[in-house]
Image: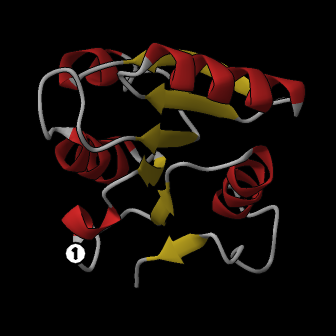
Amino acid sequence: MADSILIVEDEVLVALEMESILEERGYEVVGIAADLEGALAFAGRNVDLALVDLNLRDGLTGPEIGRRLANEHRAKVLFVTANPRLLGDGIAGTIGVLTKPTNESSLTSAVAFALSKAEEAPPSLRCFH
């Protein structure tokens, strides 16, 4: 059974590229959400990992989405953002942050690590403690 991934990203082309890369690697993308309401609509589904941007269609809601998905819905959460400094030392319950722009290798390495399929974090991923 494929690991299920939710993409929370309001830039359609970025989200579709991530979806394509992940599906080619055998992951199941359960959906793409562009805001808090859309992301939480997927929370009831079995989401193994959420890839969450910070600034979304409804503002800086990514940190709240990540916190809620991780702590209320037990999803693993990786932030994918061009503004990693906005996360400070991190969000409790989440794994870390991948800085945009990213590439296929960095994305897939970070996803594999987050889903515990890699023993060591890739250098492109800043893990929270």
The percent coordinates of residue 102 (x first, y second) are: 61, 50
The percent coordinates of residue 124 (x first, y second) are: 63, 70
Tell me how the rendering is colored.
secondary structure
Q: In the picture shown, does residue 90 fall above or below 120?
A: above
Label 1 crowd bin: few (<14), some (14–19), many (20+), radius 10 Å:
few
Q: In the picture shown, does residue 116 fall above or below 73?
A: below
Residue that appears at 49% across and 76% down: 127
Q: Is residue 68 visible?
A: yes
Q: Quadrant of the N terminus?
A: top right
In the orientation shown, which residue stands out farthest toward the left?
Answer: 59
In the orientation shown, which residue stands out farthest toward the bottom?
Answer: 129
Q: 11 and 73: which one is in front?
A: 11
Q: Quadrant of the C terminus?
A: bottom left
Helix or strand or loop: what does disc 1 sit on?
Answer: loop
Q: 103 and 63: which one is in front?
A: 103
Q: Residue 38 lies in what quarter of the image?
A: top left
Q: In the picture shown, does residue 26 fall above or below 117?
A: above
Residue that appears at 54% across and 26% down: 14
Q: In the picture shown, does residue 38 fall above or below 109?
A: above
Residue topped by disc 1: 88
Query: How many tags in the picture?
Result: 1
The percent coordinates of residue 43 (x first, y second) are: 37, 26
Residue that appears at 24% across and 29% down: 56
Q: Is residue 46 visible?
A: no
Mark 1 belongs to which amino acid? Answer: Gly
Position of residue 51 in the picture relative to residue 71 (left or right): right
Residue that appears at 29% across and 53% down: 71
In the orientation shown, which residue stands out farthest toward the front?
Answer: 101
Q: Residue 88 lies in what quarter of the image?
A: bottom left
The percent coordinates of residue 117 (x first, y second) are: 81, 61
